[in-house]
């Protein structure tokens, strides 16, 4: 199992992460949180975005075939569950009833997934950061809701790492 490690409150460059009270974050977050909960959290975070913004409304009106809510949720869910490649992410739509329930308009093409994530990396990173915060908080003792600056930095780096891994997988497929 691959994992990401962050030093906890006793962080010190002289200590190993294991001795420093490290947090180990699994690449597949469903090892910590049920997939249904991960999906629900992702949908909540994506739904919290300003979908009524006039620029977004104009864009969607001009591009009725675009499904940004679905794509944002679908890609974030893939990254949260260690699914990196566009084809596998697109296949998740057909495999998961909870995903189809969000947008029953039918499957998405792998090329659509690839293009969307390339054009929306910053937005994907934001969704992943919000999700990772929830996951980490779910593992903390009750009443420990505040995350230290070090843990927040770790979460931002973990989100960026997931996006980078997916990009490398996709590039590897294109070069094969």
Image: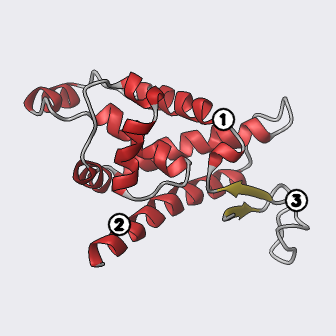
Residue 123 visible in the displayed image: no
Image depth: mark 1 or mark 3 in front: 1
Above or below, 155 against 52 in this view is below
Which residue shows up at 72% across the image and 63% down it? Answer: 5
Q: How many marks?
A: 3
Q: Position of residue 114 (x, y in %)?
A: 28, 55
Which residue shows up at 81% across the image and 39% down it? Answer: 140
Residue 168 visible in the displayed image: yes
Mark 3: secondary structure? loop
Residue 115 appears left or right of 89 = left
Which callout, 1 or 2, points at the residue further toward the start of the chain? 1
Label 1–label 2 contact, CB within 8 A: no
Q: CA distance from mark 1 to mark 3?
A: 25 Å
Above or below, 6 against 79 in this view is below
- Would you call the spot at circle 1 few (<14 residues within 10 Å), some (14-19), or many (20 or more)? few
Label 1–label 3 contact, CB within 8 A: no
Residue 21: which numbered mark, if any?
A: 3
Which callout, 3 or 2, points at the residue further toward the start of the chain? 3
Above or below, 160 against 50 in this view is below
- Residue extending farthest left: 62
Q: Which residue is mark 2?
A: 170
Q: Position of residue 138 (x, y in %)?
A: 74, 36
| Quadrant of the image containing the N terminus | bottom right
Image depth: mark 3 or mark 2 in front: 2
Mark 2: secondary structure? helix
Mark 1: secondary structure? loop
Which callout, 1 or 3, points at the residue further toward the start of the chain? 3
Residue 89 appears left or right of 138 = left
Which residue shows up at 33% across the image and 25% down it? Answer: 103
Residue 34: which numbered mark, if any?
A: 1
């Amino acid at each position: 199992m691959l994992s990401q490690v962050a030093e906890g409150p006793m962080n010190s460059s002289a200590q190993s992460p294991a001795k420093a009270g490290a947090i180990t974050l699994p690449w597949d977050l469903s090892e910590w949180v049920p997939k249904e909960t991960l999906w629900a959290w992702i949908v909540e975070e994506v739904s919290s975005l300003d979908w009524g913004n006039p620029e977004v409304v104009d864009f969607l009106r001009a591009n009725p075939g675009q499904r940004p809510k679905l794509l944002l949720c679908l890609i974030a869910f893939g990254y949260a569950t260690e699914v990196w490649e566009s084809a596998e992410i697109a296949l998740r739509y057909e495999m998961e009833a909870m995903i189809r329930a969000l947008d029953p308009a039918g499957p998405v093409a792998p090329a659509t997934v690839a293009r969307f994530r390339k054009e929306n990396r910053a937005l994907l990173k934001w969704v992943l950061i919000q999700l990772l915060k929830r996951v980490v908080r779910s593992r903390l003792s009750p009443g420990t809701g505040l995350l230290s600056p070090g843990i927040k930095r770790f979460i931002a780096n973990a989100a960026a790492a997931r996006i980078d891994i997916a990009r490398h997988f996709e590039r590897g497929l294109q070069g094969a």
